[in-house]
Image (cartoon, rainbow, N blue to C red):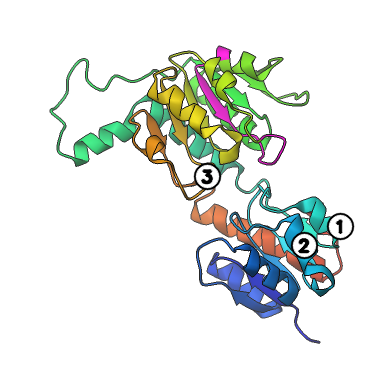
Amino acid sequence: MTQKKLLITRHIAEPVIEQARARFDTVVRESGDGMDEAEVLAALTAYDAILPTLGDRFTAETFARAGAGLRCKVLGNFGVGYNHIDAAAAAAHGVVVTNTPDVLTDATADIGWTLILATARRAGEGERMVRAGQWGGFGPKSMLGTHVTGKTLGIVGMGRIGQAVARRGHFGFGMDVVFYNRSAKQTDFPARQLASLNDVMSAADFVVVTTPGGKETTGLIGADALAAMKPSGIFVNISRGEVVDEPALISALAEGRIAGAGLDVYEKEPHVPEALRALENCVLLPHLGSATVETRQAMGQMALDNIIAWDEGRDPPQRVN
């Protein structure tokens, strides 16, 4: 029996690649960049299955251009977010799309807390000062930051990751938790759902955004939402870059209308605006949310397992369309 052809669009954990090669006629792209439209189109017509990730844009136009030449039947996405794939267009062309939820929840929540603490305690500024040889020693009023324990934590998007961030805040830091979610949500720990986004933005000392990406949340955090925050407030985004109006955030930080921000994601990754990089009151990470050895291997395994399920004629467990 002829093996089906599989394209893995980035280098992932070697044990997962070895499993893929044992089962499929597997090609692993050498480039670390996302596939452009021409490469996506070629892949859709040359492979039975593709294991893509963020940066590989599978648009409705590309599916339409593939037309009768479309060979691919499954996209086993490496990542919980799949807004780079038009899942509805994929379904219309008979292509199954899957993702990798759950396995990255704790790792991403941990990065959220890395950003909360680093921004509140000015850790980025402090490290730059030490490395530059500019630290003059302990001073009673030097590098004063913001206390975290006992403050109010606001969560925007109370899904798996949002709840994991909130649990850490409540149980670990004694924080009062408030949240905004598009639908009613019950939690198994103390947390209050407020009526509007701006209610959460104004009530919280720390706001963490954990919503999915996509059209419904693009620009959700705009100038109005940021204006509702306390001047002492700290904003953290670990969801998707396009959820935040980046120029509005830069203005709020530059003008001191909020105290600081911690970001792991950006609107046009990997581009980070120079104006954002110049701000001392902003901690910037290179999309590290799921970046642990254990998590990235689990994500690769789940993506491959979904493709294997499709190959065996089963409905993939993490199907999204």
Q: Label 2 amino acid?
A: Phe
Q: Is residue 190 above or below residue 248?
A: above
Q: Is residue 211 above or below residue 87?
A: above
Whether the magenta-drawn stretch holds residue 292 is answered as: no
Report helix, strand or loop for mark 1: helix
Q: Is residue 12 visible?
A: yes
Question: Which of the 4 quarters of the picture holds residue 305?
Answer: bottom right
Which of marks 3 and 1 precedes in the sequence?
1
Q: Are marks 1 and 2 in contact (CB under 8 Å)?
A: yes
Name the quadrant of the N terminus: bottom right
Q: Which residue is mark 1?
A: 92
Q: Which residues are magenta?
A: 202-217
* Mark drawn on residue 63: 2
Q: Is residue 318 visible?
A: no
Distance, label 3 to label 2, CA atoms, is 30 Å
Q: Label 3 amino acid?
A: Gly
Q: Which residue is mark 3?
A: 289
Q: Label 1 amino acid?
A: Ala
